[in-house]
């Protein structure tokens, strides 16, 4: 085995320190890249092993992927935890990438309790995101709220496992014994649970014919269909997830107001960490997203500073009628983002194998907005740099005081991100005296680095 292959395996080692060390050695072994093509493309919404990545990527291996492929910017996000933040930012510095890190969760929006937004079939429930975190350790003001998110998610998982165990008898799993070891930091998702059930079923039915018969009966599917999706190794199969865990499945429980934390509490926790709340746009077809303008008018005054989108599910659709409808909704969303001057952060998720590693920015639906996606990457990177160095990110009291106009504030952070080369430690170049001089002095100092 050559050194490069060995290092690429080490980049997914169990320990983050080892992963970062392997990334550093990979970058050093590569040597100067010379006059390669300019960086292209952004993926600012990659889940990692700290929740679930369909390709098994750690933050360090995502940075290596982005570096090899020549991406302009990389952002990670995980469900309910900040575990990946420190590694993501360190890996992006090593790999000379514009980087950011975030958190995704679900919240209950009391003002829209009867309305479906971006969580299908679940009125009042919002997927919600924080972007631009600078530490895996939340400050005291946010620690309890974030721990509450983690504990609520674990409780929902345990209750789901109990319901599924009863249905799948004689196949059963123990959450602590069978699921948690599949995660690096104890933050299990539905896909980890699916893998645990696949392992348990194979243990109970070592003969493939018996295994196929078991799943065909429990999923109420033809044997031929099970044969088609059931591979030779445990995998988080969407067919099993759909029948057992999604709405209408035996493991599913319709959420109520107390199932998820209030949106206001989630918002406050994100802001207390110095990060930026972001609404994840689904596809514009739900009753709540049909009235996206009204939603933005409510959320922006609360502190929401960005939209997050997964473009592929808005245009890459086989059915032509559905595609036409969703592409139209996509353009409506982008028009509103322009009108409200809200950056749109795009990515592919990677929390399911088969999802793109990078969006097709040459697609007709995306091509007109490419420069805006790059500007959004600059914006969140500029925020991350200044928040990490001096606590003066986009949501800070300093920013609201010196740049009360949100459009001017957006322009400032985008310019900071654009003119600061990836990997530069901004604190070495921006002194407290320069910060006191305000945005113009900061930009003047950064321009000298360009």
Image: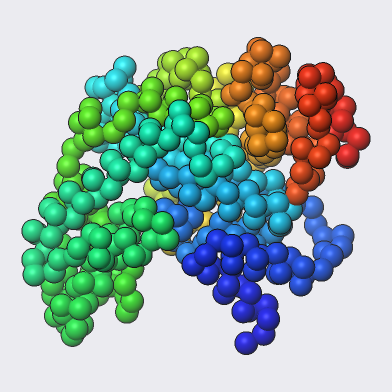
Q: How many marks?
A: 0
Q: Where does residue 60 sit, x and y in percent of width and height?
A: 59, 60
Quarter of the image holding residue 205?
Answer: bottom left
- Tell me the colour scheme of the image: rainbow
Rendered residue at 87%/30% (across/down): 445
| Residue 209 figure quarter | bottom left
Where does the image place residue 283, in percent across and percent down from the top left? 42, 36
Instruction: Please tell me which residue is depicted at 70% across the width and 51% down the height of the picture.
Output: 93
Quadrant for the N terminus, please: bottom right
Vertical side of 79 occupied by 372: above or below? above
Kindly indicate the quadrant of the structure image that contains residue 127: top left
Q: Is residue 403 visible?
A: yes
Left or right, 229 with reference to 20: left
Q: Is residue 306 left or right of residue 147?
A: right
Which quadrant is the C terminus positioned in? Answer: top right
Image coords of residue 362 (percent x, y):
64, 48
| In this picture, residue 95 sits left or right of residue 152 | right
Task: Name the residue nearer the viewer: 58 or 55.
Answer: 58
Q: Residue furthest right?
A: 448
Residue 379 seen in this snapshot = no
| Observer-nearest of 275 and 164 | 275
Question: Residue pushed farthest front?
Answer: 140
Q: Identify which residue, 287 or 118, lies in the foreground.
A: 118
The residue at the point 35 percent across, 64 percent down is 182
User: Is the residue 172 above or below the residue 342 in the image?
Assistant: below
Query: Where is 51 relative to 439, above or below?
Result: below
- Quick one: 72 or 175, which is closer to the camera? 175
Q: Which residue is pictured at 63% across the width and 48% down the height?
A: 89
């Amino acid at each position: 085995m050559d050194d490069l292959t060995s290092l690429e395996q080490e980049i997914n080692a169990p320990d983050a320190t080892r992963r970062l060390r392997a990334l550093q050695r990979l970058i050093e072994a590569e040597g100067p890249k010379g006059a390669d093509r300019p960086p292209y493309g952004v993926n600012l919404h990659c889940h990692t092993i700290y929740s679930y990545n369909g390709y098994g990527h750690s933050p360090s291996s995502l940075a290596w992927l982005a570096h090899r492929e020549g991406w302009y910017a990389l952002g990670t996000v995980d469900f309910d935890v900040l575990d990946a933040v420190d590694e993501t930012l360190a890996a992006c510095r090593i790999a000379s990438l514009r980087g950011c890190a975030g958190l995704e969760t679900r919240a209950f929006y009391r003002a829209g309790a009867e309305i479906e937004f971006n969580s299908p079939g679940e009125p009042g429930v919002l997927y919600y995101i924080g972007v631009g975190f600078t530490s895996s350790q939340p400050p005291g003001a946010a620690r309890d709220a974030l721990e509450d998110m983690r504990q609520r998610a674990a409780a929902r998982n345990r209750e789901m496992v109990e319901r599924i165990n009863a249905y799948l008898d004689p196949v059963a799993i123990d959450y602590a014994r069978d699921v948690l070891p599949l995660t690096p930091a104890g933050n299990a998702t539905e896909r980890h649970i699916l893998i645990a059930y696949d392992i348990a079923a194979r243990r109970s039915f070592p003969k493939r014919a018996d295994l196929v018969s078991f799943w065909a009966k429990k999923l109420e599917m033809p044997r031929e269909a099970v044969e088609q999706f059931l591979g030779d190794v445990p995998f988080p199969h969407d067919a099993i997830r759909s029948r057992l865990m999604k709405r209408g499945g035996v493991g599913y429980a319709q959420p109520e107001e107390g199932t998820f934390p209030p949106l206001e509490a989630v918002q406050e926790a994100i802001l207390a960490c110095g990060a930026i709340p972001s609404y994840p746009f689904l596809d514009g077809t739900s009753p709540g997203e049909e009235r996206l303008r009204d939603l933005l008018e409510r959320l922006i005054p609360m502190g929401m500073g960005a939209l997050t989108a997964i473009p592929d599910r808005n245009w890459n659709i086989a059915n032509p009628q559905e595609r036409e409808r969703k592409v139209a909704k996509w353009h409506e969303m982008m028009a509103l983002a322009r009108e409200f001057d809200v950056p749109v952060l795009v990515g592919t998720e990677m929390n399911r194998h088969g999802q793109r590693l990078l969006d097709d920015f040459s697609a007709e639906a995306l091509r007109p907005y490419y420069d805006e996606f790059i500007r959004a990457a600059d914006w969140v990177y500029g925020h991350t740099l200044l928040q990490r160095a001096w606590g003066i990110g986009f949501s800070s009291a300093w920013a609201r005081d010196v740049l009360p106009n949100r459009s001017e504030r957006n322009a400032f952070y985008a310019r900071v991100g654009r003119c600061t080369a990836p990997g530069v430690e901004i604190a070495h170049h921006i002194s407290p005296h320069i910060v006191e001089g305000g945005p113009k002095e900061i930009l003047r100092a950064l321009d000298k680095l360009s």
